[in-house]
């Protein structure tokens, strides 16, 4: 409902004028209310708390939340949906959603309309803080709406939006974008990079004021390609279907501002202990808004780095320094070192091969890596040798590196392209 979404947006904007302690107190109060509701109304969490010997009164802060066992996607998938839903929920008043299934199985979700409006307001706040206004032209290259597993509120007239299909050819996307001349351009990094390269090669004049990326791991090389081609700044946002918008980057590029007025994020080591600022941890999220199907200490299989720094922009939202990728985006070197996906940033990895369109790095075992490449008709032998050396310099001299040409890299059902995939289980304490 537009009125409710606008009310949420105004309230969320006001939150940015609070002090750090005030906005964290707001988060704490929401957390306490959500935990009490889940225990009293959701069978899954009632059992979860009882098995841990906990009552809602034991949870009064984010630190107390560490007493609650974490929840995995597989655990929810194996649970009857009736056990995950709050008592009395009217499914006809909820949006049915399902994850893209990039890990092999889809997760079915239900979100009430109030929570959907709040998510819209959180995203609207991000847009507003990054400079977007209702009268600006915005182009979004995404999965066609008819193919999406859910529909977010799209209030006509609130923002001037043009939706392009990520499934269309780059030629068609360029033609539409050149005619539309967007002030803001938004898409996955894997969709924007081919558009950016084509703009440079064909000297197409598309000059947005800002580019927004999200839904995929943003490699440093991709960000540089996008900014150079469109000659403007770019910012990245971070979220997931289950919890909605989690964090976002402002123009200061000091890290990602966590939406603590909508979610509680924890960064945990392999034993479930919170890591120190500046250390890598697996991310657990507790949604503070959706009461129909709550998520408490839900492991989203992503890794990130919390930060104790404050952004020069002055906003009170705490920072996370970076999103390092999914658990199976990390590779394992021959000597057991954990290699983050950011190690394969485009400028370092691609060298001088300018005809390359897309690539994917797949680790099959500790001693074998396959690099799938879509684009050129053939690969220069010297480039293969040099690129192989680059990979081995990170993964170990004994690693076998194979380069395979493919017609097209497959995307998941959500239109996203995973550039780094590892089939080797990661042992974090190595």
Image: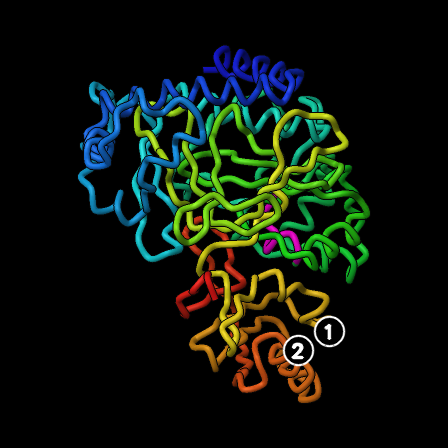
**Label 1: how many Cα within 10 Å (few below 14, some 14–19, many 20+):** few
Give residue 419's position: percent from left, percent from top: 54, 62
Q: In the image, what residue occupies the spot 23% across and 27% down? A: 42
Q: Quadrant of the N terminus?
A: top left
Tag 2's secondary structure?
helix
Q: 423 and 137: which one is in front?
A: 423
Residue 292 within the magenta-colored segment of the rendering: no
Q: Which residue is mark 1?
A: 351
The dominant secondary structure in magenta is helix
Left or right of 41? Residue 213 is right
Q: Which residue is mark 2?
A: 390
Tag 1's secondary structure?
loop
Q: In the image, what residue occupies the spot 57% across and 36% down? A: 247
Left or right of 87? Residue 16 is right
Query: Range of the magenta residues?
Result: 187-193
Q: Is residue 161 above or below residue 196?
A: above
């Amino acid at each position: 409902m537009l009125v409710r979404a606008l009310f949420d947006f105004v309230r969320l904007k006001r939150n940015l004028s609070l002090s750090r302690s005030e906005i964290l107190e707001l988060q704490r109060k929401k957390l306490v209310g959500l935990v009490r509701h889940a225990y009293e109304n959701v069978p899954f969490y009632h059992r979860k708390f009882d098995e841990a010997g906990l009552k809602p009164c034991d949870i009064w802060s984010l630190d107390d939340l560490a007493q609650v066992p974490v929840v995995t996607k597989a655990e929810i998938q194996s649970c009857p949906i009736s056990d995950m839903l709050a008592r009395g929920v009217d499914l006809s008043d909820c949006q049915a959603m399902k994850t893209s299934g990039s890990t092999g199985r889809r997760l079915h979700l239900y979100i009430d309309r109030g929570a959907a409006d709040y998510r819209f307001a959180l995203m609207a706040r991000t847009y507003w803080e990054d400079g977007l206004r209702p009268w600006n032209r915005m182009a979004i290259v995404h999965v066609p709406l008819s193919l999406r597993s859910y529909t977010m509120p799209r209030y006509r007239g609130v923002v001037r939006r043009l939706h392009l299909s990520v499934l269309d050819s780059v030629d068609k996307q360029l033609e539409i974008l050149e005619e539309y001349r967007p002030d803001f351009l938004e898409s996955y990094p894997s969709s924007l990079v081919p558009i950016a390269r084509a703009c440079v090669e064909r000297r197409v004049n598309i000059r947005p004021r800002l580019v927004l990326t999200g839904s995929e791991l943003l490699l440093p090389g991709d960000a540089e390609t996008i900014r150079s081609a469109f000659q403007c700044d770019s910012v990245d946002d971070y979220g997931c279907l289950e919890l909605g918008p989690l964090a976002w980057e402002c123009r200061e590029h000091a890290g990602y501002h966590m939406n603590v007025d909508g979610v509680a994020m924890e960064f945990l080591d392999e034993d479930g202990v919170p890591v120190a600022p500046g250390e890598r941890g697996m991310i657990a999220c507790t949604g503070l808004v959706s009461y129909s199907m709550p998520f408490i200490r839900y492991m989203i299989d992503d890794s990130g780095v919390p930060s104790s720094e404050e952004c020069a922009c002055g906003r009170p939202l705490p920072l996370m320094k970076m999103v390092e990728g999914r658990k199976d985006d990390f590779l394992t070197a021959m000597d057991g070192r954990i290699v983050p996906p950011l190690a394969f940033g485009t400028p370092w990895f691609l060298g001088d091969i300018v005809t390359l369109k897309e690539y994917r790095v797949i680790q099959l075992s500790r001693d074998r890596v396959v690099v799938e490449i879509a684009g050129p008709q053939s690969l220069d032998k010297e480039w293969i040798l040099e690129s192989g050396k680059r990979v081995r310099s990170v993964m170990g001299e004994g690693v076998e590196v194979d380069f395979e040409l493919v017609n097209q890299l497959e995307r998941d059902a959500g239109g996203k392209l995973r550039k780094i995939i590892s089939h080797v289980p990661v042992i974090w304490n190595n």
